Amino acid sequence: MKSHIEEFLDIDKPKDYYSNLVAEIEERNREHHFITTLNSNIASEDRGRLPFTVKANICVKGFETTAGSKMLKGYLPPFDATVVERMKNSGNFSFLGETNMDEFGFGTFGLNTETPAKNAFDSSYVAGGSSAGAAVATAMLKYHIAIAESTGGSISTPSALNGVVGFTPTYGTVSRYGLIDYANSLDKIGVIARSAADARIGFDVIKGRDAYDTTCSIEKIEDSKKKKLFLIKELMDKAEEPVRSSFGRLLDKLGEKYEITEIKSSIIEKSIAPYYIIAMAEASTNLAKYNGYKYGMQYEETNKRYNNFFTEARAEFGSEAKRRIILGTFIRSESVKERYYAKATQVRSMVIKEMRKILKEGFIISPALPIFTPKIEDAVKLTPTQNYAMDVFTVPPNLGGFPHITFPYDYHDGMPLGAQLVTEHANDYALFDFVSEWEESFNYRFRYNLGEL
Amino acid sequence: MDNLEFERLLKTTRLKLDEKEKIAIQKDIEEVIGYFEKISEIDTEGEEKAYHPIKVDPRFREDSVSRFADVDMLKRQSKLQDGYIIGPKL
C-alpha cells in the first residue's frame, strides 16, 4: 500500500491548505473532541510538510500540555520532548496540535478526562484509550501521523477501535524524554498512522539513543520474518463469541500463508494483576509532584500551610487518578510491598521468559480487545476490574516491553475490528512487513478524510 | 481494607475525598485489591525481579554544566515575588 506521507509530500498543496484544514478540524472537533490544543500558526508554515499531532502527555514547547488532567491546566512546557524535536527537525513534518487522552493515561476507553474524545466512526461509541484523540485524529485526517504513547495498551486499543494502524515499539527504542510519566518501566512512545508504511516512517524518525533517557538503549532494529502464528488459548477464551468468530475469518485468510497453532500458557493470562500493580506503584510516585503551584494549575490559597494547601490543590485529580494514587501508595507500603510489588516484578520476569520462548518461533496474534466497540453509555457502567479485564490482549506485550502492532481486519455494523500482532524484542520492522502484506488485500474504510487533496 | 488504613492512605497521599467519593473509592479499592490477590496463587520461588522489561544498557552523558531549556518560561507560569515562585507556608 502506498504511503500517505510520501503521497502528500509529492503533491502541490493549495496556498490555503493548512488554514482550510484547521477550519475542518475545528468543526469536527466540536463533536469528537480529539484535539485539545490546536496550532493555528501552522497556516504560516511550509505547506510541503505533513501535519503531525502528539498525545497531550508529550511536551511541546509553548503549547498547553495537560496529560488530560485539570492538575496541569495551563502548563506550557519550556522545551520539546525528544520525539517532538526529531519530528520537527526531520524537515518533513509540521506540528498540528495535541490530542485528547485519559488523565495521565489512566483508562481503556478514553473516558477518564473532563471532555472525552469520541469514536471517529460514530460519536456514540468510545474512542478507546488512553491515546484516544491520537487514534481519532488519524481516522479523521487523510494526511497526518500521530505520536502516541502506550503503558498497557494505550496505542493498540484506540487504534483498533478507530480502524487505524497502532504501533508500540520495543521498550527502550524511543526516548521518553519530555513524556509526562505514568509508569517509567512500562511507558513507550509509538506511532499511529493510516498504513504500516507510514507508521514505519514515523518510527524511523523518532527512534534512537538519547542522552536524556538512559533506558533508551536499543539501537539495532531487526526484521526477522516469521512463518508461524501462535494463538494463546487462555487469552482467546476471554474473547466474546462474536469477536472470536470474526477473528476466525481473519485466521482463515492468514492460514493461506502462515502456519497457525493454538498453544497453552497459564502464565501469560495472569499478566493483568502484576501489570496494574507495577503501573499503579510507579504512577503513585510520579503523581506526587503535582502540588498546585509548580506545574500547571495554580492554587491560589498560598497563605495556607503546606499540607493543607497540597491536599486541597490535589482535589483536582479525577476519580481514576485518585484511585490509582491510593492503590499505588498502598502497594508500596512496607507491610505489603513483598506481597504485591516484589511478587509482580517476579511474575513479569516469568511472562517475559515465556513470551520470548514463543516469539522466537513466530508471532503471537489475537484480537485487540475481547469485545466489540462499546457505546459510551455502556462503557461508563463498567467497574474498575471489568475495565482492567478489557486489557487482556494488550497487557502481556506491554508488561514485557515487546513490540506490537494493531491493524484493522474487518468491519462489524460499520465499526472497525482490530487485530494485534506481537514479536520479539527489537524485531519491530517485521511487524510493518506483516501488516503491509495484509494491506495488499484489505480496503481501509474511513468516515472522514479531512485535508483530502 | 479497614477505615483506619484507608484514612492513613488518604493522609499519606494528600488526598481529600468528600463522603460520596470516599464510599465509592473505598469500595473500588477493595475490589481491586481482591483482584490483585490472584498473584498470590503464582509460584515465583527463585524467580528474578524484572524492574525493566529489557536489559538496560545506559550510556551517561558528559557531566558538564548546561542551561536547561527556557527556565524563565516555566517561572512565568507561576506567581512570583522578587523572581522567586510563591508557594504555601512550611
Image (spheres, coloured by chain):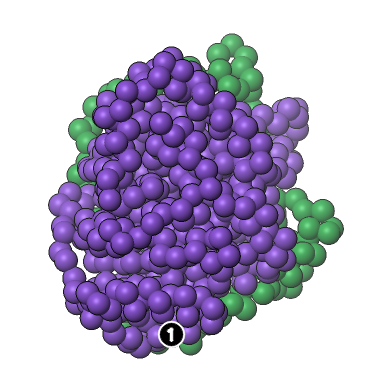
Chain colours: A purple, B green
Q: Is residue A317 left or right of residue A265?
A: right
The front one of A237 and A184 is: A237
Quadrant location of the C terminus of chain B? top right
**Residue A148 screen position, x and y as percent:** 43, 46
Residue shown at the point (43%, 71%) measured from the top left: A367
The front one of B48 and A99 is: A99
Residue shown at the point (25%, 77%) measured from the top left: A256
**Residue A360 screen position, x and y as percent:** 19, 74
Residue shown at the point (15%, 52%) measured from the top left: A220
Disc 1: which chain?
A: A
Work out whether residue A45 can be spotted. yes
Work out whether residue B54 can be spotted. no
Residue shown at the point (58%, 58%) measured from the top left: A109
The front one of B13 and A321 is: A321
Read off the residue under disc 1. A234
**Residue A157 screen position, x and y as percent:** 48, 60
Q: Is residue A314 left or right of residue A290?
A: right
